[in-house]
Image (spheres, grey):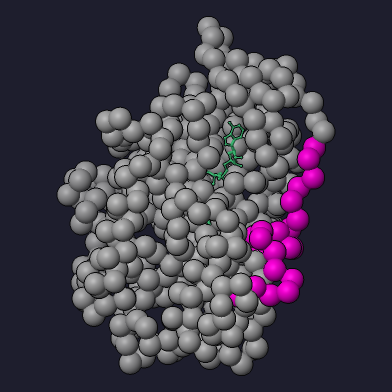
Amino acid sequence: MAAPSDCFSADFKPQPYWWDATPRQPDDLMKLPAAADVVIIGSGYTGLHAALQTARAGLDTVVVDAEAAGFGCSTRNGGQISTSVKPSFSLLKRRYGEARAIAILKEGQASLDHVAKFVSDENIDCDFSVVGRFHGAHTAGQYGKLLRECEGRHPGFETGAFMVPRDQQHSELGTDAYYGGIVFPRHSSIDPGKYHAGLLAVTRSAGARIISQCRVNDLQRGPNGFDVSTDKGRIRANKVIVATNGYTGPLTPWQQRRVIPIGSYVIATEEIPGETMDRLFPTSRILSDTRKLVYYYRPSPDRKRILFGGRVSLQETDPRKSGPKLLAELVRLFPDLRQTRISHSWAGIVAFSFDTLMHCGEDKGLYYAMGYCGSGVGMAGYLGSKIGRAAAGVDPDLGAFSEIPFQTRPFYTGNPWFLAPSVAAYRLRDRLGI
Ligand SMILES: Cc1cc2nc3c(=O)[nH]c(=O)nc-3n(C[C@H](O)[C@H](O)[C@H](O)COP(=O)(O)OP(=O)(O)OC[C@H]3O[C@@H](n4cnc5c(N)ncnc54)[C@H](O)[C@@H]3O)c2cc1C
């Protein structure tokens, strides 16, 4: 592989690949109104899906974001859509009992259906495609574990998943790095930038006002709602929706104590010859593997590049430093790509939770949904819609993720000091193949 300084193409951009097709929204010069029925903090998938519901229910809706609309993860992600629920059925059953475990898994499947239906109903041009996922086993033991999970699926969750043994792996992926894997045929891919832009347009035409460069600095509860202080002045709101996920800060300390912000990093390669793409990526599936420190990757929608992501660094936010680490891992999986350079490298902050599940809820007019654990492309919109409908009084049912405790830990205030030792332990486990 080229030395780190030679890893970048001449036209390298330290920004998401998606922003080439969907440039950042210009700042709107809209003034903040004095009052609204609902103020939504955060303009990603959670906030906009919530806003769409409240606006369509006839509520005066204002969405504010500290930065440009969609500044957070919603225009930076890898565009992979799964059922978003990480823990297995057996683990969920041990924790919550069978009925709740089933309810949680059903929510995961509903979130996958939700995004498919949404982009179709609203006619959003965002390269949504049901391509399926190949999930590679990084050890023989992990292949056995995937096989047992595949065979022991709970009735009612027939996902159509099937195993691909190592000797047939090249029909899925041109690498020998895995010990076979599993295919989830319903998992899908999307261009997250186009999806966000389409969602923004639909939400605006439903009547919601979206005001960027408008950080909320203070939130006070009064007898008749909330007093919200922002960079652009104050606004009174009957209801507030917190949709800040990995960017949740001291404004909402209860939520901040429950989410763990973690950097996630992606690169796009320069264009790769079609013949090489077809050999290494014979399908357009999205891809991931069984390592604890997960890598996720896929061909770009036009199949000219590879988008390769992972959690290569804890605090490092400089994409020029994270990029070469990701490229090294890509080349380890596909040695033929050793001359390939990086055209884009970027990062964003995802929110994990202590139980690796997402959560939503309400407290006297304040609604929230967050903690997607790096899998929010489907789930954020699904839970955003739920809290929007609840805030609008259309449907109070917030579903299974509102019925489980949103845990914190003693002395945790939002600074994840414990991540460095955990990541080191995970790295070691991945290296040892445990
Ligand atoms: C690099 C990367 C790759 C990813 N890949 C995938 C993937 O392939 N599949 C998947 O399912 N998920 C993926 N994710 C996660 C997914 O993108 C997120 O779960 C999802 O976008 C969360 O949406 P959201 O609307 O809740 O939050 P965000 O889109 O992060 O929006 C939160 C917004 O809140 C705003 N905000 C915060 N505080 C304030 C304040 N005080 N005042 C005003 N505004 C505020 C921020 O500016 C931000 O715009 C990835 C994330 C990253 C970073």
Asked if residue 335 lies left or right of residue 40, the reply is: left
Specify the segment rendered in magenta.
7-28
The answer to whether residue 351 is above or below residue 166 is: above
State the residue in front, 36 or 166: 166
| Residue under the image location 30 percent in, 30 percent down | 411
The reply to whether the magenta stretch includes residue 8 is yes
Percent coordinates x, y for residue 123 in the rendering: 69, 57
Q: Quadrant of residue 354?
A: top left
Q: In the rendered image of this protein, does residue 243 appear above or below residue 344?
A: above
- State the quadrant of the C terminus: bottom left
Residue drawn where x is 53% and y is 7% of the image:
223
Q: Nearer the viewer, residue 422 or 112?
A: 422
Left or right of 234? Residue 410 is: left
Residue 101 appears left or right of 345: left
Residue at horizontal 23%, vertical 80%?
140
Give the residue drawn at x 62%, y 27%.
216
Q: Residue furthest top?
A: 223
In the rendered view, would you say 400 is above or below 420?
above
Q: Is residue 141 above or below residue 354?
A: below
* Residue 179 coordinates in the image, percent (x, y): 30, 83
